[in-house]
Image (tube, rainbow, N blue to C red):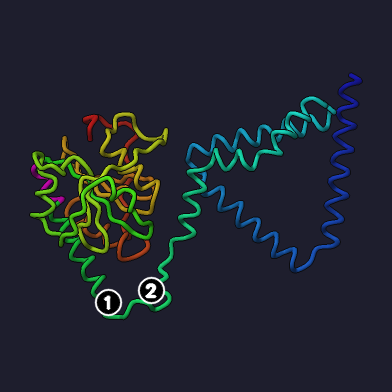
Amino acid sequence: MEWFAEFWSQCGEFLSNLWIQFGSLVSSFTLTSMLDVLLISFIIFSFIKLVRETRAEQLVKGIFLLLGVWLVANVLQLRMMQSILNYFFNFSVIALLVVFQPEVRRALEQMGRSNLGRNLGLLSAKEEEALEAQKKKCITAVADAAASLQKSRTGALMVFERQTKLGDIIDTGTVVDAIPSPPIIGNIFFNKAPLHDGAMVIRDGMVYAAGCILPLTKSDNVSIDLGTRHRAAIGMSENSDAVVVVVSEETGQISIACNGVLTRNYTRDTLKAALEGFLLKEEPEHPQRRIPSIRRGKKHE
């Protein structure tokens, strides 16, 4: 039991030193220190919110496990383990940037999303009203087209660009730049049309491009029975702030993907209301329920 007593003694000494350091910090605590703590707390909270329910969550758990091993190695004076972990943590910043590249990119994109033109008054009131009116007409056209595609069981994938510009996605398709209408949208997704097997990108209330290729989701939480069309919609919403409308080819069911979440069972009216909430306001007023964990369907959907 000598090793246990030594271990307990080392733990007590370590905790005692921590308490002394904590007391020293409290005695020198100032208003600037409080601001510093609040900023760090906000960064940690934002980081937790960013990685929650993603693959990065498991990586964070692994990092905390390594920190626990490092703490035990320091207490027990395990020199070799200390050296290995010290070398690892010395290069951990670069390693974290590589491992968390998708999450870092998403965080930077979220920081950069702001209506600068509107906040700085670069758009006149008439221009802003005209843009909002065009968006409303586009939403109505998409809702009408989705209802028509639902009846004919025609698959469709429509992406509404918001703050994150989708130039790299547009480059994979064909620029159309047309005024949206149910006939235009129906012709694009007609199963014998050359641009039907891809996504349509809508920018500023206009059908800007069609036949575009979207990134597939890499989330492990998506049902394995969901096919390519729905996975592409989720993936697009994970990599940007875009709102994606999906019409199922097998069932005709209308779905919306936003912020990595797929919601289903929309009608023409509820789709229009949800899109107006997403695109004309910050949040939808009546979000639908999440997708079921298991759902049968065609693999190409």
Crowding near the residue tagged with mark 2, few <14, some 14–19, many ≥20 C-alpha atoms within 10 Å: few
SS label for mark 1: helix
> Which residue lies under the disc numbered 1?
127
> Which residue lies under the disc numbered 2?
118
Numbered disc total: 2
Q: Nearer the viewer, residue 138 or 286?
A: 138
One can see residue 266 in this view: no
Residue in the image at 23% along x and 35% along y: 301
Q: Picture coordinates of residue 73 (x, y %)?
A: 79, 29
Q: Amino acid at mark 1?
A: Glu
Question: Is residue 157 rendered to the left or right of residue 83?
Answer: left
Q: Picture coordinates of residue 145 (x, y %)?
A: 13, 53
- For the N terminus, the image quarter is top right
Q: Nearer the viewer, residue 86 or 299?
A: 86
Question: Is residue 260 rendered to the left or right of residue 43?
Answer: left
Q: Which residues are magenta?
A: 146-152
Q: Tell me the distance, in whole angstroms, between the alpha carbons under discs 2 and 1.
A: 10 Å
Does the residue at mark 2 contact the one at mark 1 (Cβ under 8 Å)? Answer: no
Which quarter of the figure has residue 276? bottom left
Disc with the residue nearer the chain's start (2 vs 1): 2
One can see residue 49 in this view: yes
Residue in the image at 8% along x and 54% along y: 183
